[in-house]
Image (cartoon, rainbow, N blue to C red):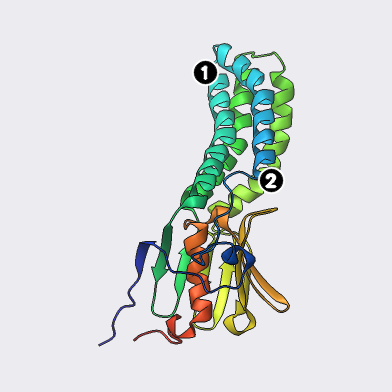
Amino acid sequence: MRLARRSTTVWRQWAMPSHSGTDAARENPDGRFAAPPVLSKSVLRVYVLIALVIVGLGLGLWVLWVSGSTSARIAAILMAAVVLLPTVALVLSMARRRSAVLVIEENPAEVVLRGSRFFALALLTALACIVTYPIALGVAVVRDGVEEGSATMFVVSLVVALACLPVLVMMLLGKYRLNCLVLTHDLVTYRGYRRASSAPWDALDRVEITPEPKVQLLVSGPGTAIEVPLGLMASGPVPLAEYVDDLLRHPERRPSKSRTN
């Protein structure tokens, strides 16, 4: 009888001591990886940029809202979503830096550690709002006569929407995929939204969390490296690093070479 391959998603509170030789691990008495700081220079720069964008758009959105035009108010809501959704996703990503949860899908021949669905959905929704924003604003300008710089805003937003439209179409056609880290018996593969990179376990000898300039899991060896953006992953940085490090040091714990039939 041919048995169906079983797939399970597991949420674990991972607390296995790390065997990595990284500097971050040595700084901790219990040998575990150090979690990246919640706030860093790069994160603060992003927050400052977001604050400037909110201030810059705030007056324009307020004008649209008080105009009394339904289309103008819809445009204001769409643009607010463009700013707020990625901001919320970023805040949750910062909070997840202290998460002890490991989200994995275990199959006979591979282990998959998926990316954050919320982060990907927030970006997709924001992109859809960017593309539809000039439609609502155009109706407000042409039909409802909303002025106060709305015509200029419409032209600029239309150019931006036309530039983003191909990306949205490719996402809807499945050309972009949810990112994930795939571990098999022989390979470590990170599949990003568009590109993938992989390396054999035998070519890797180091696991570390790099806090700057971007927080990522770096699995490296002589002449090769796999970079995993931890802000885009569903798992916490420390349990994810410890899990990969454990498989690196213990080949017998890796998934089997062939699928179970």
Location of the N terminus by quadrant is bottom left
Q: Quadrant of residue 232?
A: bottom right
- N-term-proximal mark, 2 vs 1: 2
Which residue occupies 65% across, 45% down? Answer: 40
Q: Position of residue 84 (x, y in %)?
A: 55, 34
Q: Residues within 10 Å of mark 1 (few under 14, many from 20)?
A: some
For the residues bearing labels 2 and 1, Cβ distance under 8 angstroms: no
Q: Is residue 80 above or below residue 85?
A: above
Residue occupying image coordinates x 64% and y 43%: 43
Q: Name the disc covering residue 170, or none.
A: none
Could you tell whether 106 is left or right of 248 in the image? left
Asked which secondary structure carries label 2, the reply is helix
Q: Residue at x 53, y 73 (%)?
A: 245
Percent position of residue 207, x then y? 59, 70
Instruction: Report, in whole angstroms, how far the alpha carbon at label 2 lies from the one at label 1.
Output: 39 Å
Residue 210 vs residue 233, the one in the foreground: 210
Report the number of discs. 2
* Residue furthest to the left: 1
Q: Amino acid at mark 2?
A: Ser
Residue type, mark 1 in image:
Thr
Callout 2: few (<14), some (14-19), or many (20+) C-alpha neighbours within 10 Å?
some
| Side of 30 relative to 175 (left or right) | left
Q: Is 126 in front, or is 45?
A: 45
Q: Which residue is mark 2?
A: 42
Q: Position of residue 227 (x, y in %)?
A: 64, 65
Q: Which residue is mark 1?
A: 70
In the image, farthest residue toward the front: 29
Q: Quadrant of the C terminus?
A: bottom left
Observer-side mark, 2 or 1, equals 2
Percent x, y of residue 65: 56, 16
